[in-house]
Structures are given as C-alpha cells and as structure tokens.
C-alpha cells in the first residue's frame, strides 16, 4: 500500500526554497553562463553548437514575461528546484518512506549546496535535476507494478534531451541495471518499449538538427 504523502511540509519547503532563491537573486551579479543564455535567447533555434534549445528558450520566455532583469532570468530555475524538492519527496515515498523520510528528503534537497546554486542561477543543471528525478520517479512507479508509467518516463526523457543529451546515459544505465540485476521481466514489457519509442519521437527534432548541421555538439565534445 502506498504511504500518504506529506504534502503540506513538503510544499512549504519547496515554496520557501524558491522564495529564498528569488529574494537573494539581486544580491549577486550574472554568472557567465547566464550572459551566454541571454545572447542565445535572441537567436532561437532547434539546437546550438554546444547545447540543445531548452535553457535558451526559457531565458527568452523569462525576459519576455518578467522583464529584462537578473531576478526575472532566475524565476524558472527557482521554480524548477521547487519542483525538484517535491519530486524527491515523492521518490522517498515510492521507496517506502513515511512522512518523516519524505520531509527529510525534501529538506535535504532544499538545503544542498548544489541545489541552491541551481535554484539561484540560470544553468542547464537547474532543469536537469527535476527532469532526471521525474524520469526516475516514473520508472520506479512502473517497476512497482504500474507499467504504464513507462510512457511518462519516456515522455520526460524525450523532453529532457532538449536540455542535455546526457539523459540518454540515465536511460542506458536503467536498461543495463535491469539486464544485470533485474527484474529482467521488465525488459519484455511492451510499455517499456512504448516509452522508449515515445522518448525517441520527442527527441527527434533536436537530433535531426544535429544531424543536418554535421553533429556540432559531438564535434565540440571531441
């Protein structure tokens, strides 16, 4: 039986995390990556030489919605980390943790140095963290007897490729783990393969961009 979710303290923790990040935003100047994303925001594309389009797209949206300020640029990272705090508590619940474990997981995430940097600065990792955690949460749900959650895991994985292609490593690691440690029966589940197909379809436009531009990210990485 699924344990109750400690939604009140978890939600409060998430809101306080985002609020603190935004309140302190004017105290520190631009990170160099934020200046770069400001430039890319003026040149929307399906991809760039060094990265997919999601973070530059969010930079453009933030500047358009909230104004051309440093705090405006950091709204989406703060919200993303608030979502991360909630997702981590749900992962704890999925793994059998009670209310105390869920709150501890949320609080530990909210106060981690790496998390606070991600909440306070517009970086690709600001969105990697909740996207990867969501994929893990949905995979856990699928492995615990609700196989249709593989579709949600696939959808998030496909969407995450627009932030970083490294999400493919998470998918490959999951498949390797199932093959080596099990449960191997999950590899025969049609919902798993449907989720993988969905991820590939969603990732296709950015991959087509890379292919038609001679794989610039691969060239840069090498």
Image (cartoon, helix red, strand yellow):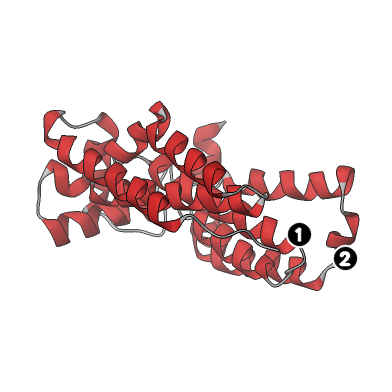
In the rendered image, residue 89, in percent from the top left (x then y), is placed at 51, 49
Question: Which secondary structure, mark 1?
Answer: helix
Q: Residue visible at 89% across and 55% down?
A: 184
Q: Can see residue 29?
A: yes
Q: Which mark is residue 143?
A: 1
Q: Quadrant of the C terminus?
A: top right
In the rendered image, residue 135, in percent from the top left (x then y), is placed at 59, 55
Q: Residue visible at 16% across and 40% down?
A: 23
In the rendered image, residue 158, in percent from the top left (x then y), is placed at 56, 61
Q: Is residue 220 left or right of residue 111?
A: right
**Among the 4 quarters of the image, the one containing residue 122:** top left
Q: Can see residue 52?
A: no
Distance from disc 2 to disc 1, alpha carbons, whole Å, reads 12 Å
Q: Is residue 165 left or right of residue 179?
A: left
Instruction: In this rendered view, identify the residue nearer to me: 160 or 44.
Output: 160
Instruction: In this rendered view, identify the residue nearer to me: 119 or 205.
Output: 119
**Among the 4 quarters of the image, the one containing residue 121:** top left
Question: Which secondary structure, mark 2?
Answer: helix
Q: Are marks 2 and 1 in contact (CB under 8 Å)?
A: no
Query: Which sits earlier in the primary sequence, circle 2 or circle 1?
Result: 1
The residue singled out by tag 2 in the image is 188
Q: Is residue 37 left or right of residue 191?
A: left
Q: Residue visible at 57% across and 66% down?
A: 155
Q: Indicate which label's residue lies in the foreground, 2 or 1.
A: 1
């Amino acid at each position: 039986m699924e344990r109750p979710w400690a939604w009140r303290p978890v939600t409060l923790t998430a809101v306080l995390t985002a609020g603190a990040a935004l309140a302190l935003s004017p105290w520190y100047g631009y990170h160099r990556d934020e200046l770069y994303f400001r430039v890319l925001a003026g040149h929307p594309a399906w991809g760039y030489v060094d990265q997919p389009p999601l973070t530059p797209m969010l930079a453009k949206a933030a500047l358009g919605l909230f104004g051309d300020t440093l705090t405006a640029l950091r709204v989406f990272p703060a919200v993303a980390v608030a979502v991360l705090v909630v997702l981590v508590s749900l992962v704890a619940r999925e793994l059998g943790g009670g209310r105390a474990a869920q709150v501890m997981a949320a609080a530990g995430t909210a106060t981690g140095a790496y998390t606070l940097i991600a909440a306070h600065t517009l970086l690709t990792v600001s969105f990697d963290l909740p996207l990867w955690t969501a994929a893990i949460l949905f995979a856990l749900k699928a492995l615990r007897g609700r196989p249709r959650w593989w579709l949600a895991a696939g959808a998030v994985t496909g969407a995450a490729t627009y932030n970083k292609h490294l999400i493919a490593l998470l998918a490959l690691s999951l498949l390797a783990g199932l093959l080596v440690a099990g449960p191997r029966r999950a590899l025969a589940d049609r919902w798993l393969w449907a989720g993988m197909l969905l991820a590939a379809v969603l990732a296709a436009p950015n991959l087509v961009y890379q292919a038609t531009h001679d794989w610039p990210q691969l060239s840069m990485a090498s």
